[in-house]
Image: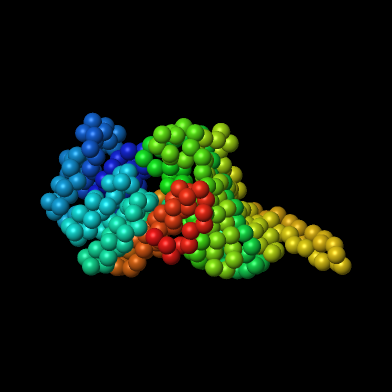
Amino acid sequence: MINTAVIGVGRWGVHWLRILLEHPQAKLKAVVDPNYERLEAIKRQYNLGNDVVLTSDAQALQYINELEAVIVATPAITHYSLISDALKWRLHVLAEKPLTLDPWECRELCDLAEKQHRILMVDHTYLFHPAIIRGKNVVESGKIGDLRYGYATRTHLGPVRQDVDALWDLAIHDIAIFNTWVQEVPVKVQATGTAWLQQNSGLADLVWVTLTYQSGFVAYIHLCWLNNDKQRRLAIVGSKGSLIFDEMSQTPLTFIRGEFEVKGNLYIPVNQSQQVIEIEKAEPLKQVCNRFLESIQTNTRPTSDGSMGAELVQILTNLTKSLHSGGLPVNCDEI
């Protein structure tokens, strides 16, 4: 069993607490949160024993005997110092996304993890979703033909963040999925946005993103936390059909077949059909935990490692540059 601590037991951190307490290969050694009343409530809710250290100071983790790993589920602005300290204490780290808000800091953390021979993993949860894993297999099989373009919509009515805009809050999920399905990273990005609620701070409520890949594939993403029409939908269009991931659907992965037969100057739709693709039932967050613990045990690099986290933060940084310039395209080798 791997002795693990959780830093941050807010809305997302409590899920990690639950998973660790249920996991046969993990032992919860400590919980850190700045709100001591929150710690007391957690202790009662999960019936934590006195052998679990409850503390408001993350520095206390360095003195806990046999502690091996830590999960960081705090606001992204706090990630760099917490992860850096944990790695210096020779702890394996699983951090919530984004890894940090600065690509240079991400690279420093990757270098530190390498130097310390520790695992640094980022919780890009969707990459462990059975539908995304199955969808990647479908794309790789060539079933949808030559890839042409993709589109995604991630909208809802709140919660409205006051530390980052809708781009940093929402886009990382869909970018990670597109990169995984296409097996490329963008070479050029663009973003435009509108701020209605927090005009003084300029935090955009609505953002439109364009990602251009080396192969010519282009993805368009619609992000908004000021929209009553809640959607979690992503699709890739190919020459032989479209693959659709709709998280809100009872059947989240669908392949819609269809192509054109050319007769003279006419384009006639043929081979049209719709197929619901069966997927395994598994909680993505548990799959993330499984991979993190397995990576520690086998000393192997996880799928969603620090370098992937740094890559996605670099893309978001370039998108921010485009957003602040009114939508001018930014090459992804620019910093």
| Quarter of the figure with residue 46 | top left
Relative image position of residue 183 (x, y in whole percent): 51, 66
Relative image position of residue 218 (x, y in whole percent): 58, 60
Q: Is residue 232 visible?
A: no
**Residue at point 40%, 37% (across, down):** 201
Q: Is residue 42 left or right of residue 132?
A: left
Instruction: Look at the image and name its color scheme.
Output: rainbow
**Residue at point 35%, 51% (across, down):** 101
Q: Is residue 265 left or right of residue 278?
A: right
- The residue nearer to you, when weighing 2 against 223, is 223
Q: Is residue 218 left or right of residue 44?
A: right
- The residue nearer to you, when weighing 79 against 61, is 79
Position of the N terminus, as image quadrant, is bottom left
Q: Residue furthest right?
A: 264
Q: Image height check: is 54 above or below 261?
A: above
Number of dots carrying numbers: 0
Relative image position of residue 295 (x, y in whole percent): 33, 63
Position of the C terminus, as image quadrant, is bottom left
Q: Image height check: is 14 above or below 114?
A: above
**Residue at point 19%, 46% (across, down):** 58
Q: Image height check: is 83 above or below 160?
A: below
**Residue at point 45%, 48% (across, down):** 324
